[in-house]
Amino acid sequence: MSSTPFAARHSVEQVEEGTELAPRFDEHGLIPAVTTDFASGELLMVGYMNAEALRLTIETGQAHYFSRSRQALWRKGETSGLVQHVRELLIDDDQDCVWLRVEIDGGVSCHVGYRSCFYRRVPVGKAHAGGTPRLEFTLTDKAFEFEDMYPGQPNPTKL
Amino acid sequence: MSSTPFAARHSVEQVEEGTELAPRFDEHGLIPAVTTDFASGELLMVGYMNAEALRLTIETGQAHYFSRSRQALWRKGETSGLVQHVRELLIDDDQDCVWLRVEIDGGVSCHVGYRSCFYRRVPVGKAHAGGTPRLEFTLTDKAFEFEDMYPGQPNPTKL
């Protein structure tokens, strides 16, 4: 059925030091995907892929994910136009996580409207004042509001 | 019991646009943690934290994780000496993922001995030849062998 088959996992040496792509999907059939900006290195988002999303990403060079909130395959940018072009795809030692280095049409990744999903800092160590940590915004420019970009869609953030 | 309490999650606006740290742990009580090199931006590893690991990271400024293979709290570097000093900690829009920007004693992060866990590239798009993707090594220098660094410890990679 699939035109890009993944290898079966048969030894630690094969998985860690070999050249076969043999990804390990979790009990939900997913693998986490870390997406950074190709030019700046900034962490943009962390998503999840099922086997189909990973296959389509490899074959098309455009980032595909699996939306856990919608339980559906998701080509990033299909609604927003903020398509992610994968310049480099890497996999980690035990092949249960992938790293996408991307260029984004429009330069914005986050559904809230910020360039990156990671726009708030948690003070640590000596900067931690005790009690419930107070977040500091590191990005403040929003390119859009969620309701304008995704009219009628439920917000993906779950409580 | 905890000296760094996290806020309860009561609204999407609070979680996405507020200044309270209100992390969402998954059904295993874990949150993924993406760790990059502070200077170079290179993705070093992706681990998981439970509430205690996140609390200790915030309070000490040293990265703590929860080892899923050992089911135990894990201060990175406690065996290897490759301690991660957290220069910046960020949290994402829906507060279910954290980003650690770290400096590492020794400059090496991966248990296999490479600087980063992400040392192999998957060809994508036009570079994809069809069939099972063949991985290309992007890092080749190993600082150590697992058995020398962690004598007697089982390899954490699961098949």
Image: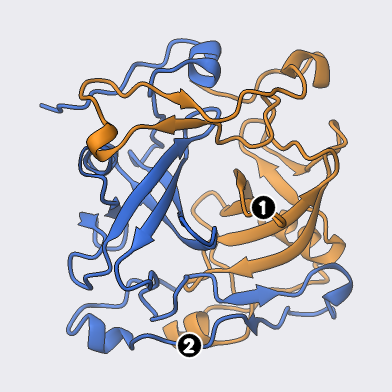
Chain colours: A orange, B blue
Q: Determine whether the residue tagged by mark 2 lies in a helix, strand or loop.
A: loop
The image quadrant that residue A108 belongs to is top right
Using the image, determine if residue A121 lies above or below residue B5.
Answer: below
Residue type at mark 2 is Asp
Residue type at mark 1 is Ser
Would residue A89 be found to the left or right of residue B26 on screen? Answer: right
Which residue position holds label 1? A40
Please report the residue visible at 24 percent of the width from the left and 89 percent of the height from the top.
B148
Q: Quadrant where the N terminus of chain B lies?
A: top left
Q: Can residue B156 be seen in this view?
A: yes
Would residue B88 be found to the left or right of residue A84 on screen? Answer: left
Image coordinates of residue A94 in percent, x first then y, are 47, 72
As drawn, the label of residue B141 is: 2
Q: Determine whether the residue tagged by mark 1 lies in a helix, strand or loop.
A: loop
Same-subunit check for callouts 2 and 1: no
Q: Can residue A47 be seen in this view?
A: no
Work out which residue is located at the far left of the displayed protein and give it.
Answer: B1
Image coordinates of residue B22 in percent, x first then y, are 38, 23
> In this view of the protein, which residue sits in the foreground, B41 or B57?
B41
Mark 2 surroundings within 10 Å by alpha-carbon count, few (fewer than 14), some (14 through 19), many (20 or more): few
Using the image, determine if residue B89 lies above or below residue A80.
Answer: below
Image coordinates of residue A125 in percent, x first then y, are 25, 39
* Mark 2 to mark 1 CA distance (whole Å): 25 Å
